[in-house]
Amino acid sequence: MKLLQFLDLGGCAKLVNLPDSIVKLDQLRLLSLPKASMVPRGFSGLTNMRKLSMFRAHMDGDWCSLDELGSLSQLRFLGLVQLENVSAASFAANARLGEKTHLIMLLLDCTSKLADDGSLKEKEGVSEEEQQRIEKVLDKLCPPLGVEYLEITGYFGQQLPSWMMSTSMVPLNNLKTIFFHNLACCTQLPNGLCQFPILQFIQVSRAPCIKHVGTGFVQAAVASFPRLNELKLNAMVEWEEWEWEEQVQAMRRLEKFVLSYCRLRHIPRGLVSNASSLKILFLKRVMNLSYIESFLSVVELKVNGCPDLERITNLPNMLKLTIRNCPKLKVLEHIASLEWLILEDYTMEKLPEYMRVIKARHLLLFCRLWLLSVVAAGQSGTEWDKFNQVEHVKAYAGDGDNQRKWYVLYTRGDNYKFDSNISSSTIFEEPLSSCMVDQQGFESLYRMRRSTFSYICSLVRIPFFEDMMTRGHTFVDGKVMSLQDGVAIALSVLNSGEPSQIVGSSLSVSESTVSVITQRFVEAMWERAFYHICWADAEMEKIKRMFDKIHGLPNCCGVVHTTHITFGSQNHEPGDEQNDDKLMLVIDPDMKFTGTHFGSQNQLSVLHDSSLFKSCQEGTMLNGSKLMLSDGLEVGEYIIGDAGYPLLPWLLTPYSMEDKDLLSADVPPYQAEFNRRHSSASTLTLAALARLKDNWKILDRAVSSFPVMETIDVCCILHNIVIDMEEIEEEDVVGMEEENHIEQVRQVADEDAVRVRDILSQHLTGSGVDATATKREAAEVVSSVLGDENKE
């Protein structure tokens, strides 16, 4: 063993203490250690060592393991770990790295202080004392002039070592490759890098404190980065700005640039104009980048997950372009040499419009099944004009692990070919099967008009089509279901509240199919139609006018009410607060729900835990126009709630009338009048809930296999859609999403809730509104709705 030259213990994770006898292996040239190993004293005698990796820096009293490295002058490769253990810079100096003239590769590693998401592991961060100590330690671990490869990992100083700031201090003229990983506290890239004459590769990964890269990174006074060939900047997650003046020459030999996970707004003009050799450009999750243009030499561009990217222009030599998940990209022009376009997006429902002007020879498309089926329609499909000019098209949609289960292959020209394994489907063409409608008639059975049913089908058609294609849903006799059949089955379950087995038996569908279809319907409606129960900013003025006209409450935006929903209440053990069993609703004058909030305790806790409470307290909701009174006072937007809610500037509750007669002289008239109007408007909640539960009887089912919150939300969505469609034709409702609303922050903390209610109430009694007429009109609205329900 004394002649042993190579020893690799890197895989011995449980080996902590190296045997003392290892210091006798004086012929040892290569040693790879486990990361947690303790180095014995006397290690300095192994002077033939050429490669030493994972050497742990540890302290034993006033002795440091780095002391053992001083005499190892033959090292070519050295990897040091856990450098945070070094208590003083003097111990690092004893390693005498600068004297190791044969050293080519140096790895300096501290235990990372970053979590997987890039944030600091310790909530309190890294102390200033720790930062200064590690800075001094690395200053003393200056490599020799001949080092070619340098890697610094887990460093948590604010500034990188001083020997990297200028070649005048340490001329690392042979340095070719440098890596920085997990720089927890570093606030800037070192200015000296640009001066290293043969530096070819730089990679920076995970540097969350760098927000700005200034002009010092590329300097006008020197030929900056004269040999740099590849630059990778990854996970500098707060980085927003890169200054590089166009006239400052640098990176003339850069061939590959990779930029990912940052907030950079634009690529500096200096890089665009100077990187004349750049061939490959990869951009991933560059969050604020809106355009890429004028990279004249680039031949391959990849963009992935850039949410604000809108245009790619003037890349005349680009041969290959890969686009993944860039939903705002609209312009693709002046790329005349394009050979390959690879487009991957599993959310888009149509091919992008820029496809019409693309002259690529090859298109490779990875998309959702719905879009692929439209492409498979060929010349009869709506997307034909966007891809028929491409010479060769390969398009795929996946199913589970098989990303190419469904395909379309197309070749244009003399060798024309069009092939697909997606057969022409009748899912959309087939009408509602006769078994779905009984003698009662459609409207009586489904509690909605045909136009409403058609609109609901349009909302879920894409996910339903994909589900039916992959699962092949059929009736028990083998007949293929249509889209309308699937929607009708799901509505039957929600309408009737009956178990899947009973619904399936009545419609000649298996229990499992009923269950799967209903769950997919709930998921699809929740994902694609949730805006139907969102806070209606765009309609708020109309809502306020209706509350004033019907109930005599000007500037009122809704009624809040908390109720218990039976649905799913027995799916969990009593007292299990992780499951929601209370529902807080905000209701408008049409008895539609403009907000749903779930909770598991009492009415007050549900309110306090809701997004409604947080937004209103912060002044970002109920922050629209104010009611201006004649005496110069004003009342902001508000909702009303019963006495179980707290009185807040934006939530007005009735005056307490305990032990008081409304006709008594002890009750101020303005308080009595406010309470009457408050009570009138509050009857909306009972009528709305009665209608909701009557139409969607599944809400009374205590046990269910469907997701509780999503199912309740979907019933509320359907409730709103039915009301909307009673007045509006289908074509006016489709696409009825939230409109833009100019937000302003309301200073709720400056408002006195008691005073707000008083001045509003006093305004009501002096406004001349006929309270009797208001009360009568409100009663007529409620009775008409309940009357319509009874007729159905």
Image (cartoon, rainbow, N blue to C red):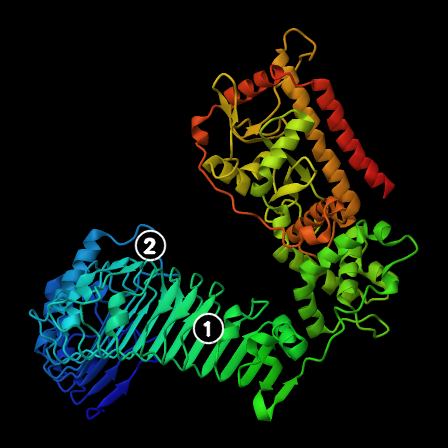
The N terminus appears in which quarter of the rendering?
A: bottom left
> In the structure shown, which secondary structural element does the residue marked by tag 2 occupy?
loop
- Residue 309 bears which disc, if any? none
Compute the Cα span from label 2 to label 1.
Answer: 38 Å
Residue 73 appears in the picture as rendered: yes
- Residue 246 falls in image quadrant: bottom left
Residue 185 position, x and y percent, is 26, 58
> In the structure shown, which secondary structural element does the residue marked by tag 1 occupy?
strand
Residue closer to the observer: 152 or 555 = 555
Specify the farthest residue to the top: 665
Residue 574 left/right relative to 132: right
Residue 190 appears in the picture as rendered: no
Identity of the residue drawn at 63% across and 12% down: 669
Identity of the residue drawn at 82% across and 40% down: 789
Query: Label 1, on which residue?
Result: 323
Q: In this view, does 275 lie above or below 768?
A: below
Residue 565 left/right relative to 108: right
Q: Looking at the image, tell me whether mark 2 or mark 1 is earlier in sequence order.
A: 2
Identity of the residue drawn at 24% across and 89% down: 6
Kind of residue at badge 1: Ile
